[in-house]
Image: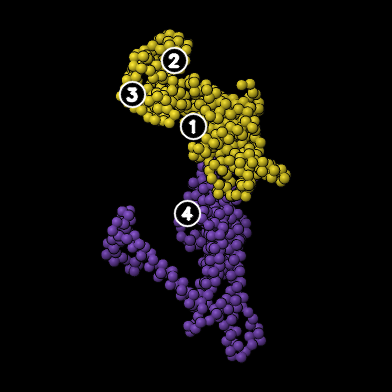
Chain colours: A yellow, B purple
Amino acid sequence: MQERPRLINLENISKDYGGVTVLSDINLYIRKNEFVTLLGPSGCGKTTTLRIIGGFESPSSGRVMFDGEDITQLPPYKRKVNTVFQKYALFPHLNVAENIAFGLKVAKRPKEEIRAKVEKMLALVNLRGYEKRSVDSLSGGQQQRIAIARALVNEPEVLLLDEPLGALDLKLRQEMQLELKRMQQMLGITFIFVTHDQEEALTMSDIIVVMKDGFIQQIGTPKDVYDEPKSAFVANFIGQSNIIRGVMVHDELVHFCGADFPCVDKGFGSDAPVDVLIRPEDLLIVGENEGRLNGLVRSVLFKGVHYEMIIDAGEMRFKVHSTVMQPEGSIVGLDVIPFNIHIMNPMPPQEIESLEEEPA
Amino acid sequence: MNNMALPPWATWVMLLGFLGFIGMIALSIRRNRGVKRSLFAFPYGLWIVLFTLIPLLLIAYYAFTNKAGGLTLDNFKTFWDSNYEMRKQMLDLGVNPADLGIARGNVNVDTLVYSLWMAFMCTVICLVMGYPAALFMADRSFKLGATLVILFIIPMWMNFLLRTIAWMSLLEDNGLINTLLAAMGLPKMRLMYNSQAVLLGMVYNYLPFMVFPIYNSLSKQDRRLSEAAMDLGANAALTFLRVTLPLSLPGVVSGITMVFMPSVTTFFIPRVLGGGNTEMFGDLIERTFLSADNWNVGSALSLIMMILILISLTLLRKADPEGEGSGTL
């Protein structure tokens, strides 16, 4: 990917509400034409970050830079960003065309231009001929499109999207994901997208920013974040994972569940405690005594593309995905290739426990 | 004082009544197992029939009959011409009332027009004062909003007559304001016994009925809508004009109706603060019933008033079909 110029720069942004810290020292830059997703569980500060970029909240400390200019104190109506709000926030007293034209009317554009642009936008979001409809008569998906059209018609440099797909059903959501991606690529503008849905983030983003408790946990491409999570939290939040406490014997060799495993990670020192991440699809089921571990199949669930098996091995409970089903109660061997073992710095024990209780 | 001494069993009766009330609550909480729910509506139904429906029918009956009980439209003619009865009697006696200089009496119609004008002025002033107040109270960033709401409600706990009489002690020739003026060496002013004083009393009494419906519709408004407007380039003034104001119109309509209706029918305030110089339609009806002892004409006047109110209520329903802006107190 070629290096694009930085458009937005958040510098040491912190925010607290009456003593409660919502954001701690956020540093983040966003490049032109990038699709950036702020991903995290509710209360992680992703929406607050978005609102600070939009100008609806001002940070307690830190600066927001836009194209090299400090816009920290600039009110929303002077910023070159537009927002698609969580529940769309369409104006109920205006019809579809009037909603889309709102920004242009406020900017006092000529009538002909407004009409032409509204028409173009409605075509873009596949809602031609809906000009005179009242927004209440539209379905959730249609309202969603109008909200996007209303923001995009102003030709913003950055579009902020605050969980815009949250209220849609699965199929519609997947459709809209592709459509949003298509729009972003076609219009060549920056999208900053907030969601708690990891799958959504992986599908659409160029860059994912994983947040938790007001801190940025990791910034990276979807592949980076999935394959090389920096912490057990990221590993567990994005995709499913087995996280095992282990000991790094020396570079490229890790010990867990009573066996030594060769791996590709270096630089953790010798005999250092680490967290070992293995994705369920990376665990290989082999014949008994053919792998490094032997385990008992506790349960089997059919998940469509694959089976999800819970296998107890070496005092650990592993989640394994495989297209081949092993009967419940059978003993199988487990193994994993070095490349699929990922070593992370250890997390405090209470956090790992809380992760295990969360439903995947 | 002896009249006020309660009989010895009064306490027990009150206690019994209170226990009955508690029992009713308990029963209705238990989803009225064994007792039909409609049974509870019976006292209310009886009340409606006895004290609302029958009086309404009586008013209609009186309005369309004369003292002898015969069907007639004379009462409505009297509304148009307060000298109608007199002129009719003169004509019966073969005298032309015009010869004696007795023309159409326009007191009743003029009083109605004056009442409408006063109510209109009162509504306009309440709106101009009430909207900004409601806007202020509904502002989430203004922390004292809830306190202001309470401050608006508290005076309404006091009796309306008392509140009006309290104004007297302020506005009187020797009242608080004039005493202060005199103490400062300024000439005393005639503050009472004019339309302005009446208007003041009306605005004072009816202002909350304007503020609360507007406050209600404003505070129910989704904050994101004004954020969306700002996001789309509208500054604070444009956001208000294009989003906040149009969306609060149901509340405004509701407020206007809730102020205008009682304003038109205002009585007592003109008598206390206007000193009888400025009679309004409510006083006219009262005087016709009680002083003039003419129930038939009084009923006709009431009926005209009710039709006016019915029309404005219908208009309200049209403007605010879901009762969105209706004040809850």
> Badge 3, how many Cα within 10 Å: few under 14, some, many 20+?
many
Label annotation for residue A46: none
Asked if marks 2 and 1 fall on the same chain, the answer is yes
Q: Are marks 2 and 1 in contact (CB under 8 Å)?
A: no
First in sequence, mark 2 or 1: give its number: 1
Q: Which residue is mark 4?
A: B328
At label 4, which amino acid type do we have? Thr
The kind of secondary structure element at disc 1 is loop
Camera-nearest label, 2 or 1: 2
Residue A188: x %, y % from top left: 64, 30
Asked if marks 4 and 1 fall on the same chain, the answer is no
> Badge 4, how many Cα within 10 Å: few under 14, some, many 20+?
few
First in sequence, mark 1 or 3: give its number: 1
Q: Are marks 2 and 4 in contact (CB under 8 Å)?
A: no
Q: Which residue is mark 3?
A: A297
Q: Which residue is mark 2?
A: A337
